[in-house]
């Protein structure tokens, strides 16, 4: 009977959409010929009830063309209860789940997203109160948890630091914690993508982990402003490490080894190399350092709300005056990074700047970061900071009408426009390391070329 039915229905006139909401019902919408009988409709519903997990399904077999004449369409909606077999879970079943650590996350919030029951959350927090790992919840890293259907937490794993494992296991209804260094194996992965709307949207579509995408933005932070400079059609190819434990299970993502980013038609390349003195960094394939003395921006992603100018209408003072810095609009709490190595010469409150940090750099350079909501923990006067370190968080303190960062570059005490100053680069590969550099990075450059060519061929 099913074969007879399908032989009489044209695929252009059958569309079955199957939804499975969280509640106990779902609906099937069937567009059909008025010739179909109620008995036939029941057969259609039985056939379409097989996939019950939110899959959008369409099917049909071409019919003879003379059956398509004078078809009348009507909608028939039926409410069906989900069979118990699909909503009941066996109590002894266990599940492995994972959650990415988000900015500002707490372990309690992560356990909640993992579906851990409240009592186990309380017991976990008590058992992990002295944990180093729980004080190092780094955005982008993954936490893995094994839970029962009831929400009971059985095991939790978190790889933190340098090949260090945090492990919490339930033994005899009590949590036992351990933190230890383990040997991780690395594998090399290669991915390519094209920007269509946003960089992170493109890296996500290409299957590139979020922390790898962030590394790319940091590698080119001195050359590309990833808020203003990104264009539709920009292309990228990334070679990076993934880490596995001795059981072959994923333990996280490692370092970006090589990357090509084509921005507005200009290709930027980077390869990783550790020099003979133990310092690692990113260089162009010919050995020039990608690390400039100053980053292009103290924020990874933001927009400039006010540029450097000698005449701007001040929104608070209601008068025209010079604006000797750049304002970056961003939500309160956005991390602010030091744009260069240096020493904090001031961290406190100053008149219209509100909470401000001033950093003294080598020679005649100085940077200032105003309107902060708070400073980074432990940071104060005479603190030494490295380029890219988080020193504070965006706020609206002082004379500010909305959350933003006021950033200044000062040379010999005078504010200068950061976008127009040519700043010195970091030194290139030393002569004694140059041969090793070319030998070690040759294969990385080859991988970039291969992956780029494969991706280009797939697009054409």
Image (cartoon, helix red, strand yellow):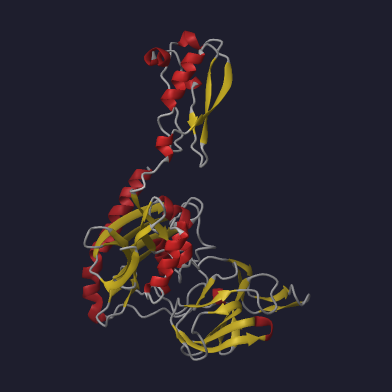
User: In the rendered view, does 311 fall on the left or right side of 307?
Assistant: right
x, y percent for residue 3:
37, 15
Quadrant (top left/top right/bottom left/bottom right) for the C terminus: top left
In the image, is residue 366 above or below residue 231? below
The residue positioned 56% from the left and 22% from the top of the image is 76
- 293 horizontally vs 375: left or right: left
Specify whether 213 is left or right of 81: left
The quarter of the picture where the N terminus appears is: top left
Is residue 20 placed above or below 242 in the rendered structure? above
Find the residue positioned furthest to the right: 318
- Percent across and percent down for residue 15 are 49, 25
**Residue depicted at 55% across the width and 75% down the height:** 393
* Residue 312, quarter of picture: bottom right
Work out whether 362 lies above or below 20.
below
Looking at the picture, tell me which residue is in the foreground, 422 or 126. 126
Q: Is residue 216 visible?
A: yes
Q: Residue furthest top?
A: 66
Give how far across and how far down residue 375 sits, in percent.
Answer: 55, 80
Please determine whether, in this image, residue 287 is positioned above or below residue 21: below
Q: Position of residue 313 (x, y in %)?
A: 74, 73
């Amino acid at each position: 009977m099913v074969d007879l039915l399908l032989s009489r229905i044209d695929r252009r006139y059958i569309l079955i959409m199957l939804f499975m909401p969280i509640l106990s019902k779902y609906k099937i919408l069937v567009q059909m010929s008025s010739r179909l009988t109620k008995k036939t409709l029941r057969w259609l519903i039985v056939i379409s009830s097989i996939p019950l997990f939110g899959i959008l399904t369409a099917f049909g077999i071409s019919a003879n063309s003379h059956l398509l004449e004078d078809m009348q369409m009507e909608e028939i909606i039926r409410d069906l209860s989900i069979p118990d077999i699909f909503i009941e879970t066996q109590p002894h079943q266990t599940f492995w789940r994972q959650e990415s650590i988000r900015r500002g996350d707490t372990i309690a919030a992560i356990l909640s997203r993992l579906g851990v029951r409240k009592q186990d959350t309380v017991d976990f927090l008590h058992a992990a109160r002295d944990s180093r790992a729980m004080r190092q919840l780094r955005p982008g890293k993954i936490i893995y948890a094994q839970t029962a259907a009831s929400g009971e937490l059985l095991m939790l794993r978190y790889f933190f630091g340098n090949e260090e494992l945090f492990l919490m296991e339930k033994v005899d209804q009590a949590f036992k914690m351990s933190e230890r260094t383990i040997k991780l194996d690395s594998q090399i992965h290669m991915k390519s993508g094209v920007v269509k709307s946003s960089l992170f949207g493109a890296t996500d579509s290409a299957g590139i982990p979020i922390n790898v995408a962030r590394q790319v933005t940091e590698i080119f932070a001195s050359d590309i402003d990833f808020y203003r400079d990104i264009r539709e059609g920009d292309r990228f190819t990334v070679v990076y490490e993934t880490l596995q434990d001795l059981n072959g299970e994923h333990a996280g993502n490692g370092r970006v080894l090589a990357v090509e980013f084509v921005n507005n038609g200009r290709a930027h390349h980077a390869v990783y190399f550790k020099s003979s003195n133990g310092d690692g960094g990113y260089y162009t394939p010919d050995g020039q350092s990608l690390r400039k003395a100053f980053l292009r921006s103290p924020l990874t992603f933001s927009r400039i709300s006010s540029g450097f100018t000698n005449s701007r209408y001040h929104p608070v003072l209601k008068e025209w005056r010079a604006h000797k810095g750049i304002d970056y609009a961003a939500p309160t709490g956005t991390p602010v990074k030091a744009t260069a190595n240096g020493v904090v010469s001031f961290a406190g409150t100053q008149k219209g700047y509100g909470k401000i940090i001033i950093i003294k750099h080598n020679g005649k350079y100085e940077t200032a970061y105003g309107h902060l909501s708070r400073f980074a923990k432990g940071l104060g006067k005479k603190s030494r900071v490295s380029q890219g370190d988080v020193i504070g968080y965006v706020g609206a303190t002082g004379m500010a009408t909305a959350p933003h960062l006021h950033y200044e570059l000062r040379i010999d005490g005078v504010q200068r426009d950061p976008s127009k100053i040519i700043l010195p680069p970091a030194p290139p590969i030393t002569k004694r390391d140059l041969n090793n550099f070319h030998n070690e990075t040759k294969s990385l450059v080859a991988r970039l070329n291969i992956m780029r060519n494969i991706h280009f061929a797939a697009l054409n």
